[in-house]
Image (cartoon, rainbow, N blue to C red):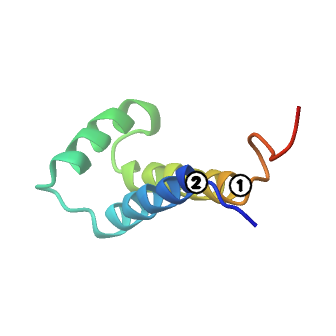
Amino acid sequence: MTVNYIGLILIIIGALFFAMAIIQPENFIVYKLFKARSTPCVGEGNEAKYMMAYSTMMIVFGFLVLFRVIGRQDGAD
């Protein structure tokens, strides 16, 4: 069985975002940017919930791509 390594990269990035949502490092630039981006969408104080939902979707999508549930199948025309 072959795997798609792009899915593995998506899983790793999603896991890092999930950890960032749990830890909430206030002086980390990526957290500040993500928090500023999500505040107009979900309101003040709900940024971590938005980040957890976003990272969970990224992890699920990564698993689907990793095991070729979605994407180009081998030998398909």
* Residue at far front of view: 75
Q: Residue 16 sits in which quadrant?
A: bottom left
Instruction: Using the image as rendered, state which of residue 29 and residue 49 is in the foreground.
Output: 29
Q: In this image, 27 relative to 13: left or right?
A: left
What residue is pinned by disc 2?
7
Q: In this image, 13 relative to 54: left or right?
A: left
Query: Mark 2 is on which residue type?
Result: Gly
Q: Would residue 52 be seen by someone viewing this image from the given angle?
A: no
Q: Residue at x 85, y 43 (%)?
A: 75
Q: Position of residue 24 (x, y in %)?
A: 26, 62
Determine contact: label 1, label 2, CB under 8 Å: yes
Q: Secondary structure at mark 2?
A: helix
Instruction: Using the image as rendered, state which of residue 33 and residue 47 is in the foreground.
Output: 33
Q: Which mark is residue 64?
A: 1
Disc 2: CA contacts within 10 A as few (<14), some (14-19) or many (>=20): many
The N terminus, quarter of image: bottom right
Q: Would residue 16 be seen by someone viewing this image from the given angle?
A: yes
Q: Residue at x 44, y 62 (%)?
A: 12
Q: Position of residue 14 (x, y in %)?
A: 47, 57
Mark pair 1, 2: CA separation? 7 Å
Earlier-in-chain disc, 1 versus 2: 2
